[in-house]
Amino acid sequence: MTAQERLIGTAEDQVGYMGKRSNSQLDEYKSNTSGKWTKYARDLDELGDFYNGRKNGYDWCDVFVDWCFVTAFGRELGQKLLGQPDRSLGAGTGYSLKYYQQMGRLFSKPEPGDQIFFGDSQTTWHTGIVSKVAGGYVHTIEGNAGNPSAVRAGQYVIGGKNIKGYGRPDWSLVPADKPEEPEKEVDDMTYYKTLDDVPEWYRPAVEKVVSAGALQGTGDGLNVSEDFCRTMTVLDRMGKLD
């Protein structure tokens, strides 16, 4: 999974969450609606110095984006990707846009994982995360969207007049996921290194196989499994080794 996919997946899991009318039932998607209290602001407020002050109870579109970054990548890396320092002003869309500008990472064409900004020449009023770019449209996941306020999916014509730009994190900062190693099969079979190690009830059959030259029986070179010894014993009893 790419870093962009991790971010987008985190945001998509929140679609349908509705803002709360009070500081209650913040973890419920559909309860105590609708308003400006959210689990997203609560969680970031609890970090103590993420923003320049507590943000719960205020507009939360940018707080939602920041929460997705911190949830997907952890605080330290999330802040680096957003270009935000401790005690940042990043809960405000205009300030977030400026953080990207300062990094030289504000673009006019969208890519999945970008932070999209909406506004005009005077102000920036809304933001979200680009989830897909296809067919001349940019698809988004946005917090504090619609009425009642909720996390919603959006779709806009690329180049729309209210799209101010796309903040693009430096995804090279995200360590690549290590491929999962296949589980190693545990071999709990008993092995016998020498003829002396072979139990006496298997030994006559194994000795015949060694005498026939099919196995090396000196030193530690035998190394046969109990299954093999059992099979040879059955064949010996059937007269197949004579």
Image (tube, grey):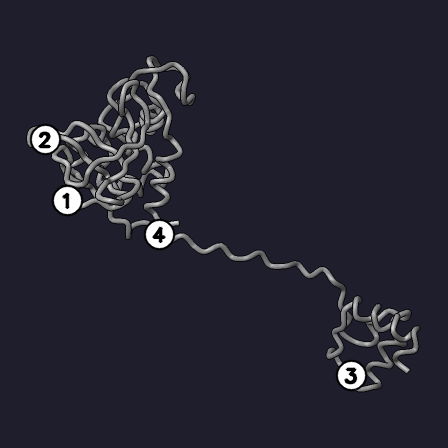
The Cα–Cα distance between marks 4 and 2, rounded to whole angstroms, is 36 Å
Can you tell which quarter of the image residue 81 is in? top left
Pick whichever of labels 1 and 3 is earlier in the sequence: 1
The local secondary structure at tag 3 comes to loop
Pick whichever of labels 4 and 3 is earlier in the sequence: 4
In front: mark 1 or mark 4?
Answer: 1
Identify the amino acid type marked 4. Pro
The local secondary structure at tag 1 comes to loop
Residues packed near mark 1 inside 10 Å, few (<14), some (14 to 19) or many (20 plus): few
Pick whichever of labels 1 and 4 is earlier in the sequence: 1
Marking on residue 120: 2
The Cα–Cα distance between marks 2 and 1, rounded to whole angstroms, is 14 Å
Identify the amino acid type marked 3. Ala
Q: Are marks 4 and 2 in contact (CB under 8 Å)?
A: no
The Cα–Cα distance between marks 4 and 3, rounded to whole angstroms, is 53 Å
Marking on residue 175: 4
Residues packed near mark 3 inside 10 Å, few (<14), some (14 to 19) or many (20 plus): few
| Residue 99: x %, y % from top left | 17, 38
The Cα–Cα distance between marks 1 and 4, rounded to whole angstroms, is 26 Å
